[in-house]
Image (cartoon, coloured by chain):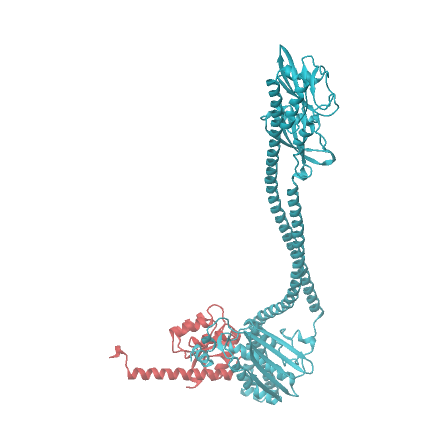
Chain colours: A cyan, B red
Amino acid sequence: MSGSPEDRHTKKRMGLYHVETAGDGRSTLKKRVFSVVVLSIAAMIAVSALILYHFYHSYRDKTYAHLNILVEKHRRDIDSFLKENLGAIRFIAKIFTFDELRDASFLENCLMNLQSHFNNVFVDLGVINARGVQIAYAGPFRLGKALYTEAPWFKKAIQSEYFISDVFMGLRGLPHFIIAVRENHNGHAWILRATIDFVAFNNLVESIQVGETGLAYIVNRGGSLQTKTRADVMKEGEILTILGEMEKGRYGQTYITTISGRGGNKYLYVAALLKDGQWLLIYRQKISDAFREYNHALRVAIAIILLGGVCVVAMGILLTSRVTRQMEKGEREREAMSAQIVESGKLAAVGELAAGIAHEINNPVAIMVEEAGWIEDLLEEEEFRESKSLKEFHRALEQIRTQGRRCKEITHKLLSFARKTDSRIHNVKLNQIIEEVVSVTAQRAKYAKVAIEKNLQEDLPCLRLSSTEMQQVILNLINNAIDAMEPDGGRIMITTRSDQNALVVEVEDNGPGIPEANLARIFEPFFTTKAVGKGTGLGLSICYGIIKKIGGDIEVESHVGKGTTFRIKIPLPVARGSATLSATSDQTSDSDRMNRGV
Amino acid sequence: MRVGDCSVLFVDDEIDFLETLLKRMRKRQVEVFGVESGEKALVFLERTSVDVVVLDVKMPGMDGIQTLREIKARYPMIEVIMLTGHASMEAAIEGMELGAFDYLMKPMHIDELLYKLEDACKRKEIQETKIALMNEKAPAPDER
């Protein structure tokens, strides 16, 4: 009666199927975790990008505004420096006469006064006549009687009231620039010229230093440098572009642009027009320097994103592996359970089938038995009394009746397996049912030399189930135990106890036990180890069906040579008043009687 | 009252079963009739009065329970024994609740059936006697 090859094959297939679903579950889980990881990283990046974007814009605006103010301030400073110095020279040219100034010692005096009042900004002073000859000079260089007729600055200076030159080398061979003021003396133009200390002027511009790379310089419209600077000067084309852009706007406004310089460095340029638009104050700073704080923030943000990403991924992996482990565990449990479900499904299907068969078989059997009875009736008549085979007829008919009864028993058992017996639910006391069943089986147990012992826990709560069915379950278990121990006899121990939210009944015997091969099949319908005609193989499957129907559990534990224990767990009714639970069985039997209309 | 003095109506859709049963009953000197459906039983009862009806529970058309209901409504004095072809305890118990005298499971021993019939007849006789006595003690208003 071991499992047929087909059976084993089916089970194997079932097993495989479950493994496959487990794998699917794991891969979908991985996909899910992956998408969660991706989503959270994406969200992190999106939020960071948004914040950085806004931070970048406000930081850029702030930086630009700051640089604008800086450059504008210096533009004003330089412009006022130039105007102040120009004013001083114009003042001298106005209040002193040509004759006074052409006197070298007077000029020297003037220079000394200027130097002491203007922080040594003025290097020298010169008086030049209309022909370009320097007729007087005061200063450190020996430039007396120098001829400036061809000097570009002289040509411009003689044509305008005052003039500030670009930086040039001139006769002295040093970079400098001059302020020239034209005056008239007896119809002849003359020029008072002052040289501005290049270092003093340069300091004005060099003081604009921001960060590591921020510096300023001045160029004229031709692109030649008016200050000394460490930086590469802008190309002329670029200067023209800037000038063009600036002339579109108002004079005095600053202009900001970014230009890629050599070596791939991007530079931020801030330009402002100086000296009535002749000079350009240019402030230059590496973008990376100007936006150093922003870049720092960017790096921190990227670091946080990376770190967060790593954390998310790590958590994802950790979570996946943990959940996967749990799923695997659950899968194993579910597998075991689904095997049980398949088993009970099979039982239910067989139950339906059995009910159908029972109905169909029962009527023909009834007719057969009835016909046999009719024959028996006829045999009573005179004409058959003398028949030699009368005895044999009676025996045969008796046999038909016996076998008919056997058929009836089988069909009735089949039908009770299909749960067509009295399944109405009452409050029942488990211990009382057991006492009743034990008293019913006592006689049989005595003949089989089986001692039935009880260890019943007092005050067990009432159960809500069909007492007939419960009786059937206990009866089947006790009968099976007695059958198993015949003819040597033995001991049956029936235990009841409450366990959390369930009642537990154990029917334990010390019989020969059930071999492992049979253990898995004992709840299958028609599985029996009893001799043909002795058992229908339905008893335990009926028990199984009944216990499962009331939401309980039936388990078997068996050791060959030691004995078998059947353990039934019946859940207690949930959330019911204690009054219902403690309802006595007297009331139950009362209601029974009422139900029966007695 | 012996069974022999009783008249019994058997209602069963299994003609073969019914006929054999009728033969055996007649051989035992019981006055029996047989019909094969609940509807026919009701028609039969309109013409002929019987003491006991033996009803199969499972029949096509009007089933045993319905027929029982009708019989009990029209002829409350008739005793009914339910005959179940299957172990439908619910139906049998429902039958009992509806006033059936008892029930038997097919296939049954002929003697068992005879005892039940005898019991049913006795019960009917007792009931009728009681009612007769009651009527004597307290005659109906319209008789005054």
Picture coordinates of residue A475 (x, y %)?
Answer: 57, 81
Residue occupying the far top of the picture: A187
Q: Quadrant of the C terminus of chain A?
A: bottom left
Question: What number of labels is visible?
Answer: 0
Picture coordinates of residue A428 (x, y %)?
Answer: 50, 78
Q: Nearer the viewer, residue A502 or A51?
A: A51
Q: Is A279 left, or right, of B117 in this rendering?
A: right
Q: Residue at x 55, y 85 (%)?
A: A440
Q: Nearer the viewer, residue A312 or B111?
A: A312
Q: Quadrant of the N terminus of chain A?
A: bottom right
- The answer to whether A584 is drawn above or below residue A332 in the figure is below
- The answer to whether B33 is drawn above or below residue A188 in the figure is below
Q: Nearer the viewer, residue A397 or A298?
A: A298
Q: Is A294 left, or right, of A591 in this rendering?
A: right
Q: Residue at x 58, y 89 (%)?
A: A386
Q: Quadrant of residue A126?
A: top right
Q: Nearer the viewer, residue A343 or A188?
A: A188
Residue occupying the far left of the picture: B144
Q: Is A24 left, or right, of A368 in this rendering?
A: right
Picture coordinates of residue A552 (x, y %)?
Answer: 56, 73
Residue occupying the far right of the picture: A173
Instruction: Examine the rendering and report whether any part of residue A390 can be seen.
Output: no
Picture coordinates of residue A490 (x, y %)?
Answer: 64, 87
Q: Quadrant of residue A188?
A: top right
Instruction: Examine the rendering and report whether any part of residue A127 can be seen.
Output: yes
Q: Is B92 left, or right, of A160 in this rendering?
A: left
